[in-house]
Amino acid sequence: MEVQPQQEADDDVTATNNNNNAADACSNSALTLDLNKIDLPTFRQMIKPYLQRHQLETALFWYDKLVTLSKGNPQDVYWYADTLYKSGQYHRASKLLERYKLDERCVSGRYLKAKCHYESKDFQEALNILQDFDESEKSKDIKSENIDGIPKSDASLESAVLLLKAKIYECMENRELALSCYKKSLKLDVRCFEAFNNLIQHQMLSAPEEKKLMQQLNFNLCEDESERTLTKYLYRKMLKKYNKPQDVSNEIDQLNDNFDVLVSKAEQLFYNCEFNNCFKITSGILKSDPYNPSCLPVHIASLVELRKTKELFYLAHKLVDLYPNKEISWFAVGAYYFLINKHEPARRYLSKSTTLNRVFSPAWLMYGHSFGVENEHDQAMAAYFSASKLMEGCHLPLLYIGLEYGLTNNSKLADRFFTEAQKIAPEDPFVLHEIAVIAFQNQQYAEAENHFLNALNKFVASPQSLKSDKWEPLFNNLGHVSRKLKKFQNSIKYHKEALTLLPNNSSTYSALGYTYALSGDYQSSIDCFHKSLAIRKDDAFTTTMLNMVVEHFMNEYKPYPEFSDALPFFTPADTIPKYLGSSKVEVTKSESSSITLDDTEEPLAVKEVSMIQDEEMEDV
């Protein structure tokens, strides 16, 4: 029959399927047997190289299988959650820890879960997770197990927990509790740089408080004397520098080329107003390490001071392209617009910078400056007040508030804020200078002189420290107060120093001319007034003083003392031969008889003229 081949084919297919099923059954049995023989420690070691090469997706794939094979081994669960955290999958990591109750079994698990909520900006939940953690030893509710392969609960981990709590409090704008947690974190682990850096960079401590903290830190936690010396040196380099000019030196030669040490040196040069030297150092750092985050703020500030618009424009664009979510990028953009006097866009970008980082002090200060340069004193003070609340350890907002009050002729409030700024930074020469200005305005000249000289003595005795035109007002003000105290020679000396810093300043020439006039040196006074008017022709004070000094100069000094001021008189008998010479004049007898020359008596007309001149001279 014709259907027989078809039946044979169907029988062959059925036989083949039966054989395949039998083979699959054997294969599954073998696979199950092989999985049971997998060496889990070797499997864990296999995953580590992927983490080291930042192949997180591959590591996650195998960690997922490892957790299943090990039936939820705690160390496998922990490192699986840790890898999820590193890959930015915070919610998955938190749920994984909850599912295996690892957050209840060990401090490391709870700490990791809290970090996941912190990174998700769920600050209250993160704080609740850590709320029961005893800040001195261990958690109260957690039975802390020492699980192999998981970081154990020790002083370092407890310090990390306190550091996380401090960050959470700071994000919730509870700076007082944040400050307390940062300090406790450092006491447990003096090497916790992040806690120390946040205390300093977020302006939580004043300069005296920073020194007190350094004395309280237990550097004996370091392994040996060399590590203690190194830690102290590096921390000391991070302390506030703008409160007192200091000598720029390096104590550890082996760290001469370290970027953090070089940044510290550049900051000191900047606060000493040596902007060119600062710019050289920061440029060298950024050439080797482009976009170094600790170097960028002082580098941008030096670009603004040196008015390098092209370099700042290029840097701002590169930062925005590479780091659009960083506050330093928009600060650079705002600084560029501030430098080219476009203050409205400058404020817009500076505001964005402060939104990304509420405690980024350079952006806050420049935001206030953008109002100040437009004489918008109320808005400038509002910006500085906001900055002062976020920068409680920094005196600069208080100093600028005082300056704005001074510009509005409110010297009492200005003096109040200067005094508050001095409490935070007692050795800052800028604060001392402004206090002296208030004393000068109150006619307390001796007190003003003491403050001015105190500010001057704060500078480093190096040739570079006083070459910046930033100190020109200090020398001019010293000249003014010396003039008020009748110390004319000192006044002249200080004004000349000011001219070396800012040569083409008309007001300095006017002040110098005024001092010369009071000291009786009218010639030098006139020269200075002329130089001032050559720079600023419409200066009313200088013009008035020049006229007065010239009049005094005319009355006191005769131009040609060997000659008399009276007009000379010559008789006709003397003048005729002089002008006629040897030429002969023929006079008729009738003419000669009509001319009468009397040498003993002046003609009437000449007498009248002479009398009038004498009267005029007496009037003069």
Image: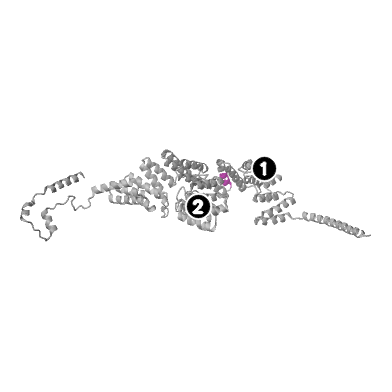
- The residue that appears at 27% across and 48% down in the rendered structure is 550
Q: Quadrant of residue 183?
A: top right
Given the image, on which type of amino acid does mark 1 rest? Answer: Ile
Kindly identify which residue carries mark 2. 300
- Numbered badge on residue 142: 1
| Structural crowding at the residue carrying mark 2, measured as other residues with C-alpha within 10 Å and reported as few (<14), some (14–19) or many (≥20) | many
Given the image, on which type of amino acid does mark 2 rest? Answer: Ile
- Numbered badge on residue 88: none
| Structural crowding at the residue carrying mark 1, measured as other residues with C-alpha within 10 Å and reported as few (<14), some (14–19) or many (≥20) | some
Q: Secondary structure at mark 1?
A: loop
Q: CA distance from mark 1 to mark 2?
A: 48 Å
Q: How is the image coloured?
A: one colour
> Going by the image, does 61 lie left or right of 410?
right
- The residue that appears at 30% across and 50% down in the rendered structure is 526
The spot of residue 429 in percent (x, y) is 43, 47
Which mark is in front, 1 or 2? 2
Where are the magenta residues, as a range?
A: 181-188
List the single residue furthest toward the right. Answer: 1
Q: Quadrant of the N terminus?
A: bottom right
